[in-house]
Image (spheres, rainbow, N blue to C red):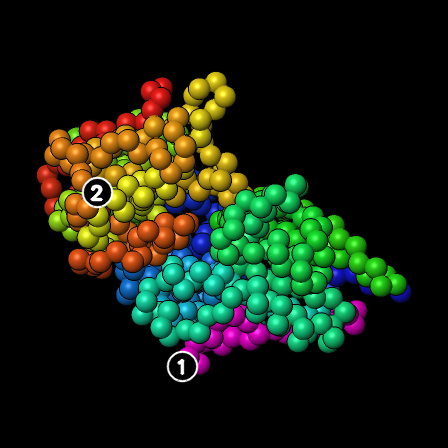
Amino acid sequence: MQKSFHIRYTSDMHGYFSPTSYADTQEREIGLLRLMNEYPHDGNTLLIDGGDTLQGSPFTNYYERIAPESKLFQLSDNSYGSHPAAAMMNLAGYQYITLGNHDFNYGLEELATYLRQISATCLLANVRDKAGQLPLRRYAIHTLENGLRIGLAGVTSHHIRIWEKPETVEQLEIEDAFTSAREVYEELRDQCDFSILIYHGGYECDLSTRRVLSTDTENQACRICDEIGYDLVLTGHQHIAQPGMTYGLSYTVQPPQHATHACAIDITLEDGRKTFSSELLPASAPPNRKGMLILSPLERKVQSWLDTPAGFLDQALPCVPHLEAALHGSLVANFINTVQLDCTGAQISTCALPNEYKGFSATPTIRDIVSTYIYSNTLVVLSISAADLKKYIEHTAEYFELLPDGTIGLSERYMRPKVQHYNYDYFAGLDYTIDVRQPVGDRVTRMEMDGRPLTPDERVTLCINSYRFSGASDYNMLPGQPVVRAVLTDVCDAIIAYILERDEVHIETHCWSRILPDT
């Protein structure tokens, strides 16, 4: 007998519920409120989300950090929950979710509030909170209307251990994602007709050639597909649009970020044979009217806040192509580093630029700032030797690749399987040269401060953000360095305060780096 069922799957919404990018006030084809109007609601359809829901948009930034009194502000209808993310997930009808690394950013108390209000079951086999306040389950068996028993499990990247605040991590027990995925599969496999893993992690291999692109265990989906045996592996975290394919023992998909698309998956079981078809559904439907009404009071407050004038700069800071900025310097990065040096007193500062950002006008609004510095980071000042600082710059210099015609391009490892412009760092307070013609690991040919070369054993103070200090993306020369001080002000807040406190902000135009060969 033939039986079929269907899945709508999202991941990495990052707080984009309304149909706007928040870079302006225009409605766009984005957001859960558009996607949900295409969701079927019947006994043979599962609605699933892969995490990173609570953090990442100006909306969630305002709700969680800028105006905490907004949590006391009533939505127009609280029947779906008073937490806006929970209300939208409930309105959409999600049945199962897992958590992403960014869902822990605001602490366990806020996460518990969200999870207690959401109707969906949260499946997370490799993370437990020691106090037991998070309503998590290792797996669930869901019986469809047609009688099929679907086993579902969830895991998230165990790199939460290094990314998240220490005070949050110490409240958790975090296990390896692959190990937990395998263990929970053994628990549920004999109880179901079809098995699904919701994995907040991505692909470490090229899906076409199977070539290994990263040996970092941040992403283990290919190994999971090859070695465990789940029928379907729903991935996320990398923000890669993968409409669906068979890899190893499993069928696998991944939607892009910000609720621009959902994965629509149709599965048929007949005489023991399982067949799949899938596609990416765009957020092109009209936004859900009820959801728009529920969020409208809070959205008006967010938009009013975003349009607040922040101050005056002596020139605009435009968004330029990433390779151009890396080769010739970035005014945006210069300004961020200026702010970081001002609030930490360090000798050298470093920062990175997001994959996508707005840039600042000469009369910036809050919208410009939060659409350019999109991360939730604080700052750490390290005491570091010039020798270790060189290792740091050597690692960031791997961003470049010398092309056959002698020009400079971008290294494949920064573009595949995930675009990672945010892992190239810009330095200020240090003049340095990177010669891309030299072998990786031996490209830094000059490091000078105040016009003189640094000696290898000389120590300097270096300001970095909390994400980079975690050692993520193989910056493993940083976590063990002595900490001089921590500045717990959020970098975005520091930028806003720096502009507001000055009649006019001077933008440093000095290009601290020289990249060879000259282009």
Residue 336, position in %: x, y? 24, 42
Q: Residue at x 39, y 26 (%)?
A: 437
Q: Is residue 344 above or below residue 435?
A: below
Residue 486, position in %: x, y? 20, 59
Mark closer to the observer (2, 1): 2
The C terminus - image quarter: top left
The N terminus - image quarter: bottom right
Q: Residue at x 13, y 49 (%)?
A: 345
Q: Amino acid at mark 2?
A: Pro
**Which of the marked residues, 2 or 1, is nearer the chain's N terminus?**
1
Q: Residue at x 44, y 26 (%)?
A: 402
Residue 254, position in %: x, y? 59, 51
Image-based side of 226 in relation to 284, left or right: right
Q: Which residue is mark 2?
A: 456
Q: Secondary structure at mark 2?
A: loop
Main SS type for the magenta part? loop
Q: Amino acid at mark 1?
A: Ala
- Among the 4 quarters of the image, the one containing residue 240: top right
Q: Nearer the viewer, residue 509 or 5?
A: 509
Check whether the beta carbons of the residues at disc 2 and disc 1 lie within 8 A of each other: no
Q: Which residue is mark 1?
A: 131
Within 10 Å of disc 1 (Cα), the crowding (few <14, some 14-19, many 20+) is few
Q: Secondary structure at mark 1?
A: loop
State which region is magenta: 123-149
Image-based side of 123 in relation to 461, left or right: right
Q: Is residue 386 visible?
A: yes
- Among the 4 quarters of the image, the one containing residue 73: bottom left
The reply to whether the magenta stretch includes residue 89 is no
The reply to whether the magenta stretch includes residue 143 is yes
Outermost residue toward the bottom? Answer: 131
Q: Nearer the viewer, residue 366 or 339?
A: 339
